[in-house]
Amino acid sequence: MIRHTTLFKWTAEATEEQQQAVAAELRAFAPTVPSIRSYLCGADAGLVEGNFDFAVIADFDDEAGYFAYRDHPVHREISARTVTPIMAQRTSVQFKY
Amino acid sequence: MIRHTTLFKWTAEATEEQQQAVAAELRAFAPTVPSIRSYLCGADAGLVEGNFDFAVIADFDDEAGYFAYRDHPVHREISARTVTPIMAQRTSVQFKY
């Protein structure tokens, strides 16, 4: 299995509505991707100072499954329309387990 | 449930042995923490340029469970001894699901 994790920091200007649109669009999209085994995303709970703002965690059987998600045209379109305009920083790791 | 996610970037000087020690120590520690519901950590698989190097993902029933893990003296000791010396950057998110 491969677990994909991405953490986002939004810009200071990002509105609540824009942030919620990212989560809503990704949650609607994920079930349409056959290679996704599990998918969770969510806004930081505000427990710790200095955190990033949003996390995406997805599981796949293999590398091909991950790339099918990453490069999916609908994923690209959602990212360009909802994520890119409010993204300040982004960190990612994919690890095998 | 609360999912805790932390991504680490190691220093350029971090040895393979030092990186593996972090994973080994955390994997031995996690089963001793009663509030942990699931725990996965692993080194970046090298699929994508520019990624961070290591991920930790843990699930808890609630905030108290997360803080019991975060503030556990053995966790603090492992972090200070194995993580801090090779840590260049660290990003975190805790989200409810």
Image (spheres, coloured by chain):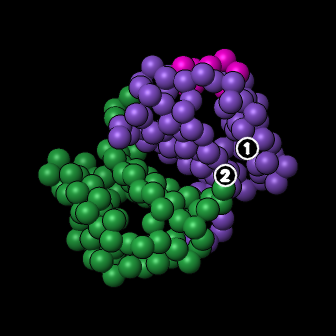
Chain colours: A green, B purple
Can the viewer see residue A29?
A: yes
Residue A54 is situated, as x and y percent measured from the top left of the image, at 36, 49
Q: Point out the stretch of residues depicted in magenta.
A: B68-75
Residue A38 sits in quarter:
bottom left
Q: What residue type is labelled 1?
A: Ala
Dot 2 crowding, Cα within 10 Å, few <14, some 14–19, many 20+ = many
Q: Which mark is residue B14?
A: none
The residue at the point 65 percent across, 68 percent down is: B46
The residue at the point 60 percent across, 49 percent down is: B55
Say above or below: A81 vs B75. Answer: below
Look at the image and tell me in which quarter the N terminus of chain B lies: top left
Residue A84 is situated, as x and y percent measured from the top left of the image, at 30, 67
Q: Do labels 2 and 1 share a chain?
A: yes
Q: Which amino acid does label 2 sit on?
A: Gly
Q: Which chain letter matches label 2?
A: B
Say above or below: A90 vs A84. Answer: above
Secondary structure, mark 1, is helix
Residue A63 is situated, as x and y percent measured from the top left of the image, at 59, 73
Q: In the picture provided, is B35 more to the left or to the right than B77?
A: left
Circle count: 2
Residue A88 is situated, as x and y percent measured from the top left of the image, at 35, 57
Q: Which residue lies furthest to the right in this view?
A: B17
What residue does disc 2 label? B42
What residue does disc 1 label? B23
Say above or below: A20 vs A73. Answer: above
Q: How far apart are marks 2 and 1 (CA)?
A: 7 Å
Secondary structure, mark 2, is strand
Q: In the picture provided, is A17 more to the left or to the right than B49?
A: left
The residue at the point 27 percent across, 71 percent down is: A78
Q: Which chain letter matches label 1?
A: B
Task: Judge by depth and name the residue closer to the eye, B90 or B3.
Answer: B3
Q: Are marks 2 and 1 in contact (CB under 8 Å)?
A: yes
